[in-house]
Image (cartoon, rainbow, N blue to C red):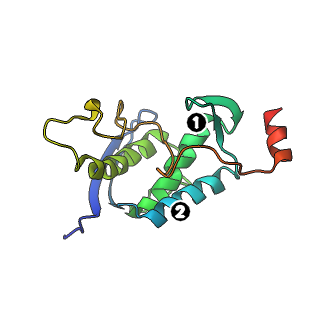
Amino acid sequence: MNTPKNQKTFTIKYKSDETGEITEGTFTVKRLAVRDRSQVGMRKSQLAGGMYCVRDDEGNPTGQGLDEDTDYLNGMIAHLEVALIQKPSWFNLAELADLGLVREVYGAVFDFETSFFRLGQKDGDTPESGSDNVGTKDRVPEYQGTGVGNAPTQVVDQQVQASLDA
């Protein structure tokens, strides 16, 4: 099967830490276009009901607004909904309960997308040398938004935000 350069087909074989069940499936992901990135952001906002994780100047959660874990999960869900163009019928994010499986699939999608950033590296450059603008301490780093900018913007009106801050 011929896959276009901006797409990748991969297979996941995952053993659940929770149940011991082995799940296997084939997925096809596309490289996100600018409009796709916008769709990811809009979908993430829908999942969060317009709320966001309030962060300080260093990017650390302040405890106001949406909690960091939910923000991260919403980002993964939104990203997978937009980026996956083919997936097994069992991969239904509204029904899956194993977060480890979702992270495994998201990790493969993330690896594909960051491969485009690595193309510009010079010989001898490594992600640790600073040439790669993607931090990858773990296989799946903390979700950092759609790449358009991570500064929070006001999404809810002042009365709603005041009640969240209280």
- At which x and y percent is residue 102? 45, 46
SS category of the residue bearing label 1: helix
Check disc 1 and report the residue beneath it: 69
Depth check: give the residue in front, 122 or 112.
122
Say whether residue 56 is left or right of residue 19: right
Q: Secondary structure at mark 2?
A: helix
Residue 11 sits above or below residue 38 on the image? above
Q: Which percent across, then down, holds residue 149? A: 52, 48
In the image, residue 62 sits, relative to residue 157, either above or below, namely: above
Tag count: 2
* Disc nearest the viewer among 2 and 1: 2
Residue sitting at x 69%, y 29%: 63
Label drawn at residue 17 = none
Q: Quadrant of residue 161?
A: top right
Give percent across and percent down for residue 61. 62, 30
Relative to 148, does residue 39 appear above or below in the rendering? below
Q: Is residue 20 visible?
A: yes
The amino acid on which the numbered mark 1 sits, given as a three-letter code, is Asp
| CB within 8 Å, label 2 to label 1 | no
Instruction: Give the distance between the C-alpha atoms of the residues marked 2 and 1, in whole angstroms.
Output: 21 Å
Question: Which is more toward the observer, 141 or 152?
Answer: 152
Q: Is residue 69 above or below residue 77?
A: above
Q: Quadrant of the N terminus?
A: bottom left
Question: Which residue shows up at 83% across the image and 32% down it?
Answer: 166
Q: Which residue is mark 2?
A: 39
